[in-house]
């Protein structure tokens, strides 16, 4: 397999570049056509490697692409999930090269989607292609289910899964959309935080008012928003919303030890991110804070005059985007209601406050002793010479919990990204080392699964 | 004079429309050329009414226009001040007609600058023109000093005044840049709040970070900014910055009574502004809050993801524009230092915080018993049939304090705007009733001054 990968490397890289050129940003309506182009590209690619029953399934949002090959009788069935949509690329001026003009430099490929998730999804397509080239057949049955709405929390994939249990039935769901611990140290993630995202808006008057004439005498929407947001958090990093911590697992010694096993270099993280200091909930380590503790973050805020210089107004409206990461048995619906109650209780005088929910997803955990995960670890170990760790990640892949729950399958998160690859940020990239070894590892995994 | 105004009304309105078409926004560098065009327009206009020694005086920012007529021997000299620059026009989508395409409807002229201050400044030019037409001479000596940086706090006019005491010497400075109490009820403002404006910026990491991977473990620039801003204000509306109230005059019964004389209709204000409730410093009335109490307002805030939908990042930077209105003996320099100390003391962990001062101006008060103010009141009374009140206004015209202090003159703030005319907001307008009566009142005032 290694030789085959080397032989086809340049051709495969050309194909990936073509895929990365498509600005399939699912969050922005002006890119709807580009997301469709992304779906077409995936469908053509699946056909070209011999997948059958390839369809582009339209939804109320962006399409799902399905394809399968089910001729490995008596062998396990693998459902490969990935997403061809990408995050918005702004701020554009911070990209060294444009986000949708992929460039290879220093052994990395730079583009929006390079690691999240086009680059990683592409590994599976190519692993299947090369296995087929090598053996004229596949060691396992394969189903691809590739969506275009992961970055907007998969609103249409969830009902699709629920309505297509039979079509999607499998022995393992395999997803490459996570990261190594660091270069050379692979990881199979065994826990993902849930998510809840919303927008909080405050309105006061029907117009911005002159701060000379009215300042001090009328409510200020930014003051009110600031007051509301600040009331949601204690200075010690705890979330101050009543009921927020309901369902958060108690921190046992065993859990603390498990989390502490994942290497974390504080000095290096601070240096890499140019951070003066880390900050988080008092009494917890960095790994605990981002892995097994919930959080509430303001992701964006806007209100009043945004231009150059000054404009002395009392602003009539202000808003903030807020997202929570949830763990254990925290219930996103209950948390949202708790935040609604908090906002009502703390609503400042003379303001109209509204809350709008974007998305929610349950937290999920996988059992690292499951055979399908252990076989994946064997594959990594053979290719990388290191047995992967089983970390608990802070991110959310909302669909993981749904796959596990609805299809009742083990979900194997075999990521090939690196934490330093700027996902969701300017200059996103993917290391070509993991491009090559990733294809090899997946090929190795499928072959091992066929023999298991 | 009344007949003359009626005779030339349409022609004068055409000229004002031409003036209002110039987008002379001093705060935005891309409008530098337009501000220059505004200066040229004023200079040409002064020449056309017979002013002499007309010059466009270049500064480090936008030009000052000067012109005089000094042939009324033995008569008082009036220095007319005004500004031809305007506020930014955003948000553009809230204007019913474009800000720089003036339109007359319902007896009002709509355009950015209509009331602040092109429309009001124009009254003086036309009053002088009509007096000259009527009598072939003027009843007083007149100097015009018209600037293009009032909306950015007159950074270059201040040194110009200080360096040209002789050239600008006068018996009264007359400024029309304030408002009536309400339609039909004129006012000569006798107090203006000082101003202090700044930007507060918070930075954390060198890049926006994925809130899944890092959320809860690293500082969030928006949380830090929100915490800093909220720490500056108590929930009871008081400013929580140590030393902020130093120099604020004690609220005597006499002062309370004086302020209470100015009519204020709470229900109507709430209805007009579509406000559920008023809000301000506990223990003070609306008139007190906006007239004789200081305030600290956030005028704008920005940080993190601003687009449609959501983007789950921990934002690397956030900033807010803050302005204070000051009263009595509050010293803007000391207040700025107090805010600097407050920010240093409350700086959240892992953040880099910077404060940048835009402008500052001292508070100022005028004596309503001064003869020059009383004669102005006589002129209003003759034209409007109502004697004006002498209110204390919440706004700041930084240059008023400088005129009074450096040139040692009484400053007569004879405004012709209405408080409902949306100054600094979309759909700014000026009532044509006050356009006509304003010219008449100014002509009457100058005539009376000539006889005094």
Image (spheres, coloured by chain):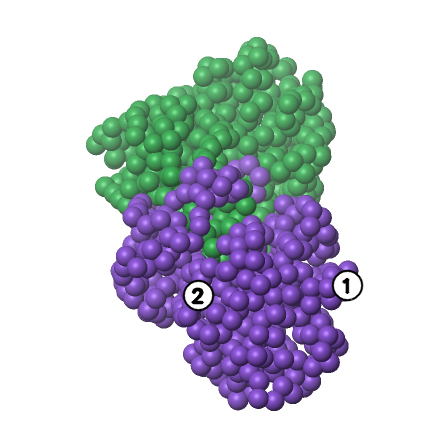
Chain colours: A purple, B green
Q: Are marks 2 and 1 on the same chain?
A: yes
Residue B329 lies, with reference to residue A11, above or below; the image says above
* Residue assigned mark 1: A7
* Residue assigned mark 2: A190
Alpha-carbon distance for marks 2 and 1? 34 Å
Q: Residues within 10 Å of mark 1 (few under 14, many from 20)?
A: few
Q: In this orientation, which residue lies closer to the viewer: B169 or A23?
A: A23
Q: In this orientation, which residue lies closer to the viewer: B175 or B378?
A: B175
Q: Position of residue B234 (x, y in %)?
A: 29, 42
> Would residue B172 be seen by someone viewing this image from the given angle?
yes
Quarter of the view holding residue A196: bottom left
Residue A380 lies, with reference to residue A230, above or below; the image says below
**Given the image, what chain letter belongs to the residue carrying mark 2?**
A
Q: Position of residue B251 (x, y in %)?
A: 24, 31
Quarter of the view holding residue A117: bottom right
Q: In this orientation, which residue lies closer to the viewer: A310 or A289?
A: A289
Residue A255 vs residue A2: left or right? left
Q: Secondary structure at mark 1?
A: helix
Quarter of the image that includes the N terminus of chain B = top right
Q: Position of residue B237 (x, y in %)?
A: 30, 43
Labelled pair 2, 1 in contact (Cβ < 8 Å): no
Q: Secondary structure at mark 2?
A: loop
């Amino acid at each position: 397999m290694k030789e085959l990968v080397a032989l086809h490397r340049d051709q495969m890289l050309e194909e990936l570049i073509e895929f990365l050129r498509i600005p399939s940003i699912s969050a922005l309506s002006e890119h709807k056509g580009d997301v469709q182009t992304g779906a077409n590209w995936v469908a053509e690619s699946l056909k070209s490697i011999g997948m059958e029953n390839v369809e582009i399934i339209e939804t109320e949002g962006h399409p799902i692409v399905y394809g399968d090959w089910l001729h490995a009788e008596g062998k396990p069935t693998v459902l490969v999930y990935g997403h061809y949509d990408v995050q918005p690329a702004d701020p554009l001026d911070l990209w060294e090269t444009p986000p949708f003009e992929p460039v290879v430099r220093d052994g990395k490929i730079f583009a929006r989607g390079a690691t999240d998730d086009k680059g990683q999804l592409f590994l599976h397509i190519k692993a299947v292609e090369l296995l087929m080239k090598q053996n004229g057949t596949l060691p396992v049955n394969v189903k691809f289910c590739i969506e275009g709405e992961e970055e907007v929390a998969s609103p249409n994939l969830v009902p699709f899964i629920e309505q297509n249990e039979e079509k999607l039935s499998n022995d393992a769901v395999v997803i490459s959309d996570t990261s190594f611990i660091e270069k050379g140290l692979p990881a199979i993630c065994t826990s993902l935080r849930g998510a809840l995202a919303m927008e909080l808006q405050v309105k006061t008057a029907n117009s911005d008012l002159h701060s000379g004439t009215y300042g001090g005498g009328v409510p200020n929407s930014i003051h009110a928003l600031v007051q509301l947001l600040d009331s949601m958090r204690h200075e010690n990093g705890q979330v101050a919303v009543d009921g927020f911590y309901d369902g958060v697992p108690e921190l046992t010694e065993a859990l603390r030890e498990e989390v502490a096993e994942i290497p974390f270099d504080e000095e290096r993280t601070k240096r890499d991110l140019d951070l003066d200091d880390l900050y988080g909930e008092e009494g917890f380590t960095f790994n605990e804070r981002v892995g097994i503790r919930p959080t509430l973050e303001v992701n964006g805020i806007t209100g009043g005059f945004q231009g150059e210089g000054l404009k002395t107004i009392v602003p009539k409206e202000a808003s903030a985007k807020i997202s929570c990461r949830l763990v254990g048995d925290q219930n996103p619906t209950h948390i949202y209601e708790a935040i609604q109650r908090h906002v009502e209780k703390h609503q400042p005088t003379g303001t109209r406050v509204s809350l709008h929910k974007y998305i929610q997803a349950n937290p999920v955990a996988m059992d690292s002793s499951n055979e399908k995960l252990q076989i994946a670890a064997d594959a990594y170990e053979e290719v990388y010479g290191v047995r992967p760790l089983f970390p608990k990640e802070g991110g959310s892949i909302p669909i993981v919990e749904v796959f596990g729950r609805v299809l009742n399958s083990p979900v194997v998160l075999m990521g090939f990204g690196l934490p330093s690859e700027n996902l969701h940020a300017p200059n996103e990239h993917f290391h070509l080392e993991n491009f090559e070894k990733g294809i090899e590892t997946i090929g190795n995994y499928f072959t091992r699964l066929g023999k298991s």
